[in-house]
Amino acid sequence: MTEFAHPEKPASEGLPFLSISLAIRALRANLLRSVLTALGIVLGVAAVVCMVAVGAGARSQISEKIRKLGTDLLFVYAGTRQALTEDDAAAVLHEVPNVQISTPIIWGKVQVIAGNRHLTTMIWGNDLDYLIARQWPLTAGRLFSRDEIASGSKVAIIGDVIADKLFDGEPRIGETIRIHSIPFTIVGVLEKKGDSGSGRSQDDLVFIPLRTARSRVLGSLQEPDPEPKEELITQKKTVQVINYPHETSYQALDHLVIKYDQPASANAMKKAVEEALRRRQHLREGTPNDFAIFDPTDAFATQEAAAKSFSWLIAAVASISLAVGGISIMNTMLVSVTERTREIGLRMAVGARRRDIRNQFLVEAVLLAMLGALAGTVLGVVTAAMIARYCEWPVLINPAVVLLACGCTGLVGIVFGSVPAIRASRLDPMVALRCE
């Protein structure tokens, strides 16, 4: 039996508790219809919560990658006609203002063996400046010594992935790995860095001295220079160019890594490095560059833009779901007004005012929307947690966003519940009482 207002007590007295109690009874009387009506709200709120959680996690991950990679690095890759050389690295350091480090790199894919385990990975030849530029610490061991760099010693610093796959994450300093059947002694293990902007693991690599990489592992990429290189020293900057014997002094590089002072902008540095290399390669005006300069933060900016676009897409879907849910609420409440016409007439006959009737149906609509918002929040959080667990994608649940989603849902309930509520309040009591 439906509860009516007391004849001697104004129907408005006891609100909002009386209205909420009556609204709960009305929704429970048609439970399945109430659940189906709130489904659009549930999906909309779940999409909003999940979208914001995943989007915030993606931005957090991108920010962490930028922090680990550094915002003050440039990568210069060789073209097809002219190779980059160590002299180019020295010239960039000497001629371009604000450059702190200009380090040469050669690399290649090799097979690394430890005991009865082996894997294919990337070998990087470098004289430590790259690790310094990246501010890449070691979890164990040490960096190469100057004597090891100069003599081309067979020493290696391995990444976290190599340590995990070949030594179950517990390599001992001094153990031996074989690279192309050549034994190398492990002198250090790098701290884990995670994926790069391109999605490739930064920890699946082995560092060896530059001269060792050329002479023993990767070979030369161009003919030896007739003259030995000297150490280039400026007032504030030093590039470490080892005075190799003339017969093994190879110059060709795969790329340069440049670290510059933070106050300098990336665009200004790219332009200055480009001008220096064009002078080195004697390129005429209008001739395209035979090298490419890459700012790694550009890749992260692209990822962030994609994440934002995805967030807007999900937001649009969520808005449509909320609108559909609101329409469902309005439709259900209109049906409810028709079904409860006699009840409305009786309430008016015993003293309920039009605003009491309007408020009663408005409370039902808002309550239905808020219950849907609560269920949607739970579903969104659970979905975000599943994404975090199974897809290894970070998610961040922001309570402010959850409150905002619930607030918007309450507004949807008010907006779409107003029409049925006003219609119910305008019924003629006499006509309502005669209704069967």
Image (cartoon, rainbow, N blue to C red):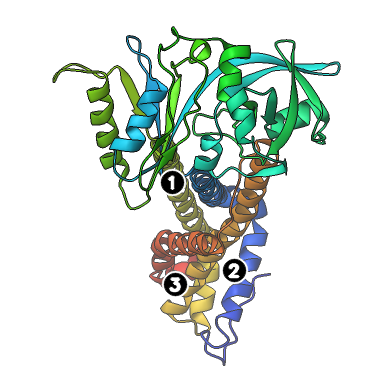
Q: Position of residue 188 (x, y in %)?
A: 71, 36
Mark 3 or 1, closer to the camera: 1
Nearest the viewer among 369 and 139 is 139
In this image, 277 relative to 156: left or right?
Answer: left
- Residue 315 is tagged as 1
Q: Amino acid at mark 3?
A: Arg
- Within 10 Å of disc 2 (Cα), the crowding (few <14, some 14-19, many 20+) is many
Marks 1,2: beta carbons within 8 A: no
Which mark sits nearer the N-terminus, 2 or 3? 2
Q: Work out whether 158 lies above or below 177.
A: below
Q: Work out whether 186 lies above or below 18.
A: above
In this orientation, does residue 340 appear?
no
Which residue is found at the position 40% from the left and 11% from the top?
Answer: 226
In this orientation, does residue 208 appear?
yes
Mark 1 or 2, closer to the camera: 1
Kind of element beneath mark 1: helix
Image quadrant containing the N terminus: bottom right
Q: Position of residue 230 (x, y in %)?
A: 43, 28
Q: Position of residue 346 (x, y in %)?
A: 54, 75
Which mark sits nearer the N-terminus, 1 or 2? 2
- Residue 358 is tagged as 3
Kind of element beneath mark 2: helix
- Residue 23 is tagged as 2
Residue found at the far top of this picture: 223
